[in-house]
Amino acid sequence: MKKQVLAAFALALVCGATNMAFAQKHGQQLIDSLKTEIPRSKPDTNKVLLLLDISFYSANINPDTGIRYGTQALELSEKLNFGKGIAEANRYMGISYNARSLFPRALEHYLRAMKKYEELKDLNGIAKTQSSMGMVYTLKKDSANALLYLRKAFATFEKLGAKGPIAKMLNNIGNVYLQDYDLPQALNYYTRALKKNEELGEPTAMESNISNLGAVYYELKQPAEALTHYFRALELNDKTGNLSNRATHNCSIGNTYLYIARDTTGTTLLDSLFGGDRTKALLESKKYMEEGLSLFEKLGNLNSSYKYYKYLSEVQQMLGDEIGALANYKKYADANDSVYNETNTKKMVTMQLQFDFDKKEALGAEELQRQKYVRNGFVIGFGVMLLFAFIFLSQRNRIRKGKKESDELLLNILPEEVAEELKANGSSEA
């Protein structure tokens, strides 16, 4: 217990120092600053926390870097028997694998993190992991499991009074509703999330909320409102430096320009933005989507990028570039198969079932022991009952055998009528 308290104190101390030293830095600049501290670090829990920071901040900029430093943090934590470090390392590695769209690997690490957090009775860690698992299921379009884990996390964060994570859960639940085309619910949750993040002054979270609101307006067939939100998010990204978000904003803007170019209903938006020139709209769409896809390819994020290959293919086809259109449609088909193939889904289901089974087994160990005692008592009691039954039957058979021998003896020395009279009355007439 003392070791856990000291580790927790070290975590708070180092995190506080890290926040003070790096508060003004973002993105790759922050990661580079953290890396400079590694040569001066001793192989203790402080170094674990430093490695964890690098892993976390790298997840959406360079997931491979996030995995590499998460692995280092995990190995050192296991060597030091640092439970908090083991849990965090697994969770951060899960975030990086999720950014790579390697969902089974992500879920594997989240489940390991969950198990360790439960051992530590760390409610905050449990809720964060539930949130991450909810995001995996969202990306796999499993809305039932996504909402299950996100609502569990939301309830725990509310219990803890964690305002930032509560806002994040509102945003993530909105993602599920947007995916299910429940647009009023999506708009409701995104708006609530944005309001909370504005109060907290969280630019990165606000960026995601605003971009997601743009996606809702796109689905509501309000492209002008969608573009306003996407460009506002892109402007915020200049401060946050989140490459994954930047890729999403660019692709979303490109897709909205495609929507405008595709519209043949005589809307004034094509006239006001491009002077009625459809080709200009398509070229602008192509520019933004190619920029976004380039960033996604750098990040290795297939899940977020695959659908934009399809949209880019459509743009190229409308521009008369049949070869480019065919090449990008093939990329779309390959990426779609990689993200949603049956093997990955089966792996995730198997791991989830195994985790649930192990958890029930651990929680029910005491109950199983009690049932074992009851079962053993029943077996012993049943054995005693069988023994008495055997003795009773043996005695009854012995009596029957004696009675038979007695009857045979009477029949040997007396007439049958006399013998029957003796058995019935105990005497007979002379």
Image (tube, grey):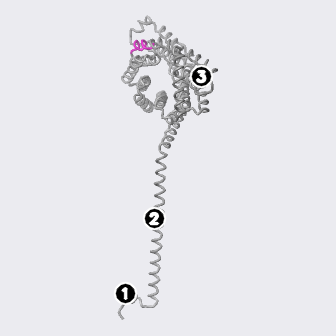
Mark 3 residue element: helix
Residue at 46% from the left image edge and 58% from the top image edge: 378
Instruction: Say whether residue 23 is left or right of residue 201.
Output: right
Write down the residue under mark 1: 426
Is 225 one of the magenta-colored residues?
yes
Mark 1 residue element: loop
Dots 2 and 1: beta carbons under 8 Å?
no
Write down the residue under mark 3: 65
- Res 294 seen here: no
Residue 314 in the image: x percent, y percent? 50, 17
Write down the residue under mark 2: 385
Disc 3 marks a residue whose amino acid type is: Thr
Q: Earlier in the sequence, mark 3 or mark 1?
A: 3
- Please tell me whether residue 413 is drawn above or below residue 157 in the rendered image: below
Q: Earlier in the sequence, mark 2 or mark 1?
A: 2
Distance in Å between CA atoms under marks 3 and 1: 105 Å
Question: Residue farthest to the top?
Answer: 275
- Res 44 seen here: yes
Which range of residues does the magenta coloring cover? 222-230
Residue 415 in the image: x percent, y percent? 42, 91
Distance in Å between CA atoms under marks 2 and 1: 37 Å
